[in-house]
Image (cartoon, rainbow, N blue to C red):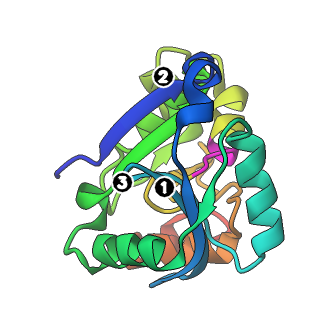
Amino acid sequence: MPEIHVYSMSTGVYEEAGKCLPLSYAMVDTPHGKAFFAESCGRIVYMSLTDDLDTALNDFKRRWYLSKPSLREDHCQRMVDKIFDSEDPFSCARILLMGTEFQVSVWEALTHIEEGTISTYKNIAEHIGHPEAVRAVANAIGDNPIAYLVPCHRVVRTDGSLGGYRWGLESKRQFLTLEGIDLSQLKAA
């Protein structure tokens, strides 16, 4: 499986250079419904599956608080169309993750879960070298800033239940079903 192109930035680096970082944002249409989308220099920095512009914009600005984003509807929609018109949106997307070292390690680990497979919060904790940090991993996954393309929907609880999903369990079920996961094998699916 081709890997998604992931770039990362620590919160410390962002605090040094964030005022110079160009950001564009817009509400866009995706195959999965409306989304608030933001990018910097061709790299996705935020995507929330929502039609609630105010809530998404507030969360985006909270995360990228030093930057002055520009509304660029056509530009953002063209980027999203190019990604989702691709045969493999996961391999053609370029992503910039910004967070603590721990968060970024969790989010990067998510990008290595192959399409059509699932993992657990415990497996992710073990993968990043923090086997006792299952709850912290779950919190980082719940704060994933890039819906679908950083595939947190592929993570379930160790007991086989779906767990949570920031953009709603129905969306998580739909994504897993689209990827060929038999939900009847999961607890309370």
Kindly indicate whether the residue at mark 1 contacts the one at mark 2 (C-beta within 8 angstroms).
Answer: no
Q: Find disc 1 in the rendering and name its residue.
A: 39
Nearer to us of marks 2 and 3 is 3
* Residue displayed at 53% across by 77% down: 73
Disc 2 residue type?
Answer: Glu
Q: Find disc 2 in the rendering and name its residue.
A: 126
Q: Residues within 10 Å of mark 2 (few under 14, many from 20)?
A: some
Q: Is residue 144 magenta?
A: yes
Residues in magenta, as a range: 141-145
Q: Is residue 155 visible?
A: yes
Query: Which quarter of the rendering shows the C terminus?
Result: bottom right
Secondary element under disc 1, as helix, strand or loop, is strand
Q: Residues within 10 Å of mark 1 (few under 14, many from 20)?
A: many
In percent of width and height, residue 150 lies at 46, 51
Kindly indicate whether the residue at mark 3 contacts the one at mark 1 (C-beta within 8 angstroms).
Answer: yes
Q: Is residue 105 visible?
A: no
The answer for how far apart the CA atoms under marks 2 and 3 are is 32 Å
From the viewer's side, name the closer residue of 142 and 170: 142
In percent of width and height, residue 151 lies at 46, 54
Q: Quadrant of residue 135?
A: top right
Secondary element under disc 3, as helix, strand or loop, is loop
* Residue displayed at 44% across by 30% down: 8
Q: Find disc 3 in the rendering and name its residue.
A: 42
Q: Is residue 147 above or below residue 144?
A: below
Q: Quadrant of residue 172?
A: bottom right
Magenta segment, principal secondary structure?
loop
* Residue displayed at 71% across by 80% down: 51
From the viewer's side, name the closer residue of 88 and 77: 77
Q: Is residue 46 magenta?
A: no
Disc 3 residue type?
Answer: Gly
Q: Is residue 78 above or below residue 16?
A: below
Nearer to us of marks 2 and 1 is 1
